[in-house]
Each structure stands twice: as C-alpha cells, then as structure tokens.
Image (tube, rainbow, N blue to C red):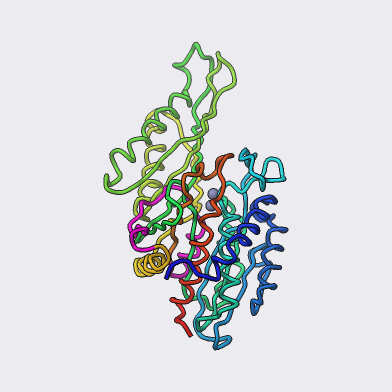
Amino acid sequence: MPVNNHIAECEAEIAGWRQDLHRRPELLYDVVETARFVTDKLQEFGCDEVLTGIGRTGVVGLIHGRGGAGGRMIGLRADMDALPIHEETGAEWASQRPGLMHACGHDGHMAMLLGAARSLAETRAFEGTVAVIFQPAEEGGAGGKAMIDDGLFERLPIEKVYGMHNLPGMPVGRFGMRHGGIMASTDEFKITVRGQGGHAALPNRTADPIVIASSIVLGLQSIVARNADPLKSLVVSVTEFNAGFAHNIIPDTAVFSGTVRALDAGHRDLAERRIREMAAGIASAYGASVEIDWDRNYPITVNDPDESDFCSQVAAEIVGADNVDPSAPPLMAGEDFSYMLEARPGAYVFIGNGDSSGLHTPTYDFADSAIAFGASYWVRLAERALGRA
Ligand SMILES: [Zn+2]
Ligand SMILES: [Zn+2]
C-alpha cells in the first residue's frame, strides 16, 4: 500500500494548514492560537471528543472506530511549539512574528497528524479508539510530561504511543527508527568552585578558583575518553564558564555549566557520578570546595523493540522496505516524547525532510513534500495497530 489515496487528494490542503501554522509560531506553553487551530480542525473533522487544556495547552482528539467507543486505544503524538529564532527563509509563508519561527518542523508534525485525523475520522477502518495528541512545550518545557502529570494516561486508557520527527539530511520519502535509545537524555549541571581570592601578585595566599575550575573542565573530558564504554555514546560538554572581574584580582569563585547526553541509563548515571567525583576530588586536592547543581532533564527516548519493528513494517507499506532504515543512527539531541515512552510502550521514528537546512537554524523549513508520507504512515499505523474493522 503506497501513499493513502485520501491523503494524496488532500495533500495541498494539508500543506496549506502547515503554512498557516508556520506563519503564526508560538513558544512553549503559549501555543494558544495554535491549540485553537488544532481544536477547530479536530471538531470540524468529526472527532468523537476533543479534550483541551491538558498540560495547560495540550489538545487530544478521540476518534472511535466502526464499533464505537470501547476497545483498545492508541496515541499518536505531535508537538506544537516553535522557537525563538528570527526566520530567514524568505518563504511566502514565513513567520509573521519577528524573532519567532517554526524551526523544528512542529508545524509539519501538526499538519501531518491533522491530515491523518481527518482521514481516520472519515474512513474509521479500525476498531477501538485513536487518540491524536498535540502537546505544547517540547522545546525544553517538558510539555509531554505536563500532559502526563495532568492525567493524560489516567483519563484515557491509551495502551501504546507513537511519535515522529522530521530529519533534515534524510531524503523525503524515507523513514528511520531503531530499537532502544533513539534520542538522548539531556541532563544539565552547574558547578561552583569556591576557592580563596586575593591579589593576583600573591597567588600563594589564594586557592585560585580559575585554575581549579579549569583543571576540572579538563578532567571531565576524560569521562567520555576513559570511563565510558567505547561502543556506547556519551557527550559531556561544558558550555559556559564565568569567573573574575579584574586583571589583578583572583576571585573567590568560578562557575561553569554544561550538559550530559546519553543513550543508555547506565551511562547517564555513570557520567553524573564521575562528574561529581571528579569535581569534588580535584577541588579538594587544590584546597577548594565545589557546589554542584544537577538537573535531570529529558529522559532517554527508548523505543520498544517490537514496536520499532512494527513501525518499520508500517513505514515499509507506505514507502517500500528499501526506503526504511530499521537501525537508523540515534541523535544526541533530546525529545520529551521520552516521558510518554517511559509511561507506555511505543516507538518514535524519523521521517526524511530532504536537504533542508538543519533543525533550529533560521533557514530551516519543513518539507511539504513529506506530508503525504507522514500522514499516510499515521493512518496505516492506526489501522494496523487497531486492526481493520
Ligand atoms: Zn527542536
Ligand atoms: Zn522538534
């Protein structure tokens, strides 16, 4: 089964929705107009129920199969928020809001899921219920978690969840997924080194926090090189370093912060443990102390192997097995669909966005040519997961 006929007929219209959404980007939880657009569309399509305000601005549409309510329920998820980037695409549908832009393609994700929702509501060739989930605040605000905390899975008996993200560099008409970790955890740390300041010409009377913090930064580089399993992926990056205020004064403190990205829970813990040990150990060797703030942010996005295989088969029905990579390389970026995958089994897949600029850049644009593949994938996934009526 190639691209869904019904979707193919509506392709231009769905691209129109995408471009409308693109013109009006909104950030994090403030996706008020976006959520209204989605809600209006879902109601217009004849969804059996449309729930709003879940996780502040999240929206869920419920579409029952031919047998009506009851039976199994699955969740298909899209994200709604944009980014604080000033668009430079020059597209006819470019952002009308200076400094804000859909630079991660969430406009495309919404449009594809809306297209699928309309088709599913019309044909209803399945049993049970499809929940189309539109979440706010994917870009660092943990909107997926907010929807769960607001009772998403208690209010709705969703058994399995599925997500999709466009991927620049992968040709349009291709899909990729993998077993296990597909997107990394994103932990953040801030380390304050407390030494003893003084006159720059009398370093012997100080415990120079700049030298000590520098030693710690260099020491942290050995965690990936010497502690991590060479066959596993781990990133430790120090991205900010602040100390001092004059050329002749050694300050009392130096502060630096950074991020840890891991694809397995063991390495996530290993990195935290080693950073803590190394920072405290090095500081103490120099007669200083450290204060460590650790923020466990997005978890690892982990695909259930069986669900990943299932998604690979569904994608192959749309684009052919040659265009599906069932062991696609993971990304070290984070994704808050990880919270939903911690709560329910499912899988997250990549859909090719062609040779567009990279995600989060001012010249990025979602490829409308991918819409037919992504929307058809969602329809087919729902029909197969819930069995054709
Ligand atoms: Zn993003
Ligand atoms: Zn994104």
Q: Eyeballing the image, is 298 above or below 37?
A: above
Vertical order, 215 against 36 (above or below): above
Q: Residue at x 40, y 47 (%)?
A: 272
- Highlighted magenta segment, given as a residue range: 320-346
Who's the residue at 67% across and 64% down the image?
38
The answer to which of 192 and 80 lies nearer the viewer is 80
333 drawn magenta? yes
Left or right of 47 on screen, residue 318? left
Query: In this view of the protein, can residue 236 be seen by the observer?
Result: yes
In which quarter of the view is residue 1 placed? bottom left
Measured from the top left, where is residue 135 in percent x and y?
60, 62
Residue at left offset 38%, top offset 33% = 282
Nearest the camera: 217 or 314?
314
Membership of 363 in magenta stretch: no
Q: Where does residue 97 sit, x and y in percent of width and height?
A: 72, 45
**x, y (%) of residue 173?**
44, 57
